[in-house]
Image (cartoon, grey):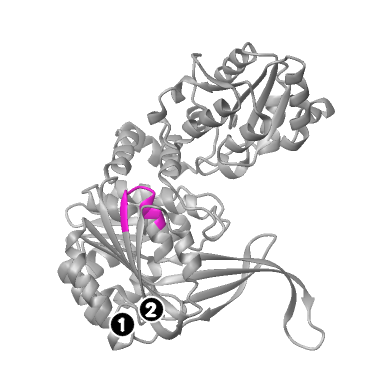
């Protein structure tokens, strides 16, 4: 074991070692992968890589970026690194903490970088990283080589032979596989690329304050905590727009920022390049900020403080907003409304959205600031509605009825909407389509790290999919993938992207 551990090094530890090897005239070769289930195809690939030089360095993807599906990776990064290190032809192993290899290539400057033949055509790489990796290698005088070896799918082997899914999900995935689900899902994700989308809704600053509990105060009935640090994220409509921008080429955002503590710089720095921002200003008010105090070791939330003015917009700002909606809403393939109930969307604005949008997708959220006052029934019409179980029950005033019956019998009569999705948290979602009724789609998520924004991610990704005419059960499955990816991200440190959706769908359905 000590021998294997000695082969596993950090990048910093290898910089001088490999530079010395190259100075002595030896050729350094680099390869990489997840290696969640080491198989014959991996062995042949690495044997070919070794023949390209003298020193073989293998990168093992860290756990954070190796989770293609629930229960994945099956083996931890350290276990996978040891499995790879046990191969005698490998000289050094590095656990790669990045989503791609560019940073390590820049540091170690390999003479040869080896990839499988599936990366030979850059257009087939959904991440787009093969181009930047090749550029990094060639910049330092190296070359990239593609192997032509027998290939196997670790995902397929794991899905068929290891119990990584509960029985109901395994049966659902089997049926979807047999029904051509993978090709259909991938086509749906790719098919919305050219959509022009307008997103309207509240900007929320998600403020994470990390603190570790020390114990009860001797003089008060409170828990004393020690401050550890903090992060701020642009959430709300900004997070929704970023998710949309990962699968659609053109996204415009209309939102409200406060004149006081606007956090405009954070918002503008957080949006993707293909997003155009129109931010009106609410005078004498802050941009809505939700400050969450979080136990840092396990990302457990202790309590939160809202900084906000959720009264209706001043008349002059409401008029500005309505003018924008009136002039622009009809120009888009899809209008996405994220209504967090924090005062931006007044009845007059809702009426214009309902009237002008070619396809209107709405999420009206119930939260601690608006409970019972921001129901989806404020919208008399929509083409697609996405809410959670609690919001569906509040909308119809029924605490006990089956959710599927609430959707098909009650909610569909209160709103002129033929397509409704209700999320069930860790149980997945229920879809409703007027012509095909309800379907329950099981969750594809593992244990959550942080659930903030999971419903928003689900809504953002499913809105254009539904607008494209997809069957609701297919849209629900894609939404469950999006939500499952999001719960593994703290706050909005990362945005779920097209690459993640495609990789997860492929891993689940191989």
Q: Residue furthest right?
A: 2
Q: Position of residue 332 (x, y in %)?
A: 21, 58
Instruction: Find numbered disc 1 in the image and state the secondary structure of the residue it sits on.
Output: helix
Q: Which residue occupies the foreground of this view, 454 or 402?
A: 454
Q: Position of residue 484 (x, y in %)?
A: 47, 51
Q: In this rendering, is residue 122 above or below 482?
A: above
**Who comes first in sequence, dot 1 or dot 2?**
2
What span is colored magenta in the figure?
Answer: 242-251
Q: Position of residue 77 (x, y in %)?
A: 66, 37
Instruction: Find numbered disc 2 in the image and state the secondary structure of the residue it sits on.
Output: strand
Residue 317 numbered mark, or none: 1
Cα separation between marks 1 and 2 = 7 Å
Left or right of 218, for residue 358? left
Residue drawn where x is 52% and y is 28% of the image: 134
Q: Which residue occupies the foreground of this view, 143 or 2?
A: 143
Image quarter of residue 40: top right
The quadrant of the rendering that contains the C terminus is top left
Q: Does the CB distance between marks 1 and 2 fall below 8 Å?
A: yes
Q: Is residue 244 magenta?
A: yes
Q: Is residue 146 magenta?
A: no
Residue 281 numbered mark, or none: 2
Q: Which residue occupies the foreground of this view, 459 or 437?
A: 459
Left or right of 124, for residue 330? left
Image quarter of residue 144: top right
Q: Position of residue 149 (x, y in %)?
A: 51, 14
Residue drawn where x is 70% and y is 14% of the image: 54
Characterize the local packing of mark 2: few (<14), some (14-19) or many (20 or more) Cα atoms within 10 angstroms.
Answer: some
Characterize the local packing of mark 1: few (<14), some (14-19) or many (20 or more) Cα atoms within 10 angstroms.
Answer: some
Can residue 406 be seen in the rendering of this structure? yes
Residue 61 numbered mark, or none: none
Q: In this rendering, is residue 506 above or below 320?
A: above
């Amino acid at each position: 074991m000590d021998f294997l551990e000695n082969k596993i090094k950090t990048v910093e530890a290898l910089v001088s070692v490999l530079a010395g090897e190259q100075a002595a005239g030896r050729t350094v070769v680099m390869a990489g992968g997840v290696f969640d289930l080491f198989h014959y195809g991996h062995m042949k690939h690495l044997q070919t890589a070794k023949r390209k030089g003298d020193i073989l360095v293998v990168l093992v993807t860290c756990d954070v970026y190796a989770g293609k599906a629930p229960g994945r990776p099956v083996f931890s990064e350290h276990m996978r690194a040891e499995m790879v290190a046990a191969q005698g032809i490998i000289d050094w192993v590095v656990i790669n903490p990045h989503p791609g290899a560019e940073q390590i290539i820049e540091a170690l400057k390999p003479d040869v970088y080896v990839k499988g033949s599936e990366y030979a055509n850059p257009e087939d790489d959904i991440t787009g990283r093969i181009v930047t990796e090749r550029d990094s290698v060639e910049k330092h005088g190296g070359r990239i080589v593609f192997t032509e070896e027998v290939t196997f799918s670790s995902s397929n082997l794991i899905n068929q032979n290891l119990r990584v899914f509960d029985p109901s999900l395994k049966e659902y995935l089997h049926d979807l596989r047999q029904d051509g689900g993978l090709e259909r899902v991938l086509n749906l994700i790719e098919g919305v690329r050219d959509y022009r989308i307008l997103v309207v809704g509240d900007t929320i600053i998600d403020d994470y304050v990390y603190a570790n509990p020390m114990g009860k105060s001797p003089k008060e009935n409170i828990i004393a905590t020690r401050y550890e640090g903090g992060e701020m994220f642009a959430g709300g409509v900004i997070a929704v727009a970023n998710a949309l921008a990962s699968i659609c080429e053109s996204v415009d955002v209309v939102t409200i920022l406060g004149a006081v503590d606007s956090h405009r710089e954070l918002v503008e720095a957080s949006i993707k390049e293909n997003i155009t921002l129109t931010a009106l200003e609410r005078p004498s008010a802050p941009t809505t900020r939700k400050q969450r105090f979080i136990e840092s070791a396990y990302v457990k939330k202790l309590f939160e403080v809202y900084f906000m003015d959720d009264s209706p917009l001043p008349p002059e700002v409401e008029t500005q907003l309505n003018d924008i909606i009136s002039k622009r809403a009809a120009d888009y393939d899809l209008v996405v409304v994220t209504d967090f109930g924090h005062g931006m969307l007044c009845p007059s604005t809702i009426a214009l959205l309902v009237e002008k949008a070619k396809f209107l997708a709405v999420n009206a959220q119930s939260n601690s600031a608006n409970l019972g006052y921001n129901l989806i029934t404020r919208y008399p019409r929509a083409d697609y509605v996405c809410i959670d179980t609690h919001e569906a029950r509040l909308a119809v005033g029924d605490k006990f009825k089956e959710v599927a019956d609430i959707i098909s019998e009650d909610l569909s009569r209160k709103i002129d909407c033929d397509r409704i999705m209700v999320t069930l948290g860790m149980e997945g979602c229920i879809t409703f389509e007027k012509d095909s009724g309800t379907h329950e789609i099981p969750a594809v998520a593992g244990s959550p790290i942080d659930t903030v924004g999971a419903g928003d991610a689900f809504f953002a990704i499913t809105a254009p999919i539904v607008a494209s005419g997809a069957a609701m059960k297919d849209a629900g499955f894609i939404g469950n993938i999006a939500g499952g990816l999001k719960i593994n991200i703290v706050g909005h440190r990362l945005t779920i992207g097209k690459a993640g959706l495609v990789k997860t769908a492929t891993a689940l359905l191989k």
